[in-house]
Image (cartoon, rainbow, N blue to C red):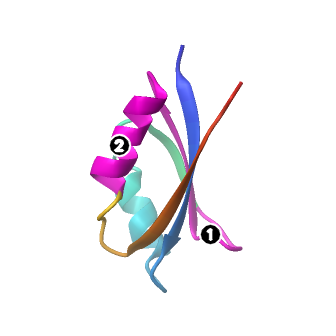
Amino acid sequence: MMTRAYVLINTEVGRAAEVAEGVRTLPGVCLADVVSGPYDVILTIEGSSPSDIGKVVLNKIHGMPGLKATTTLIALT
């Protein structure tokens, strides 16, 4: 059974499209949209477990140029 999560991303001003393009290439990322509102990019990611998703967020997404902060929401159903 796959685990799905939504990652809400805040970027530096003017870098949302660049960050979205970068995360789209990561393993498990199904969708990455630039959005309006309090977040700049929202992505949908799937993995075999919450731990696998956490590894992508911590090891691949954090530290990307232009990224300021993330909030990860694990889907419960």
Left or right: residue 10 compared with residue 76 = left
Q: Relative to 21, is 47 above or below?
A: above
33 to the left or right of 56? right
* Mark number, residue 39: 1
Q: Are marks 2 and 1 in contact (CB under 8 Å)?
A: no
Q: Amino acid at mark 1?
A: Tyr
Quarter of image, res 52: top left
Of all residues shown, which one is farthest toward the bottom? 13
Classify the position of the N terminus by image quarter.
Answer: top right
Question: Residue 21 location in percent, x, y?
Answer: 40, 61
Disc on res. 56:
2
Amino acid beneath label 2 = Val
Give the farthest residue toward the top: 1
Residue at the (41%, 66%) spot, across then down? 19
* SS at badge 1: loop
Residue 66 location in percent, x, y?
A: 37, 75
Residue at 44%, 21% in the rendered image:
48
Specify whether residue 56 is painted magenta: yes
Give the magenta range. 34-61
Q: Tell me if residue 69 is in the magenta stretch.
A: no
Q: Which of disc 1 and disc 2 is earlier in sequence?
A: 1
Q: Which sits in the foreground, 76 or 47?
A: 76
Q: Which mark is residue 5?
A: none
Q: Give the answer, above or below, for where 66 lies relative to 34.
A: below
- Quadrant in the picture for the C terminus: top right
Dot 1 crowding, Cα within 10 Å, few <14, some 14–19, many 20+: some
Quarter location, residue 55: top left
Q: SS at mark 2?
A: helix
User: What x and y, as percent, mark residue 44?
Assistant: 56, 43
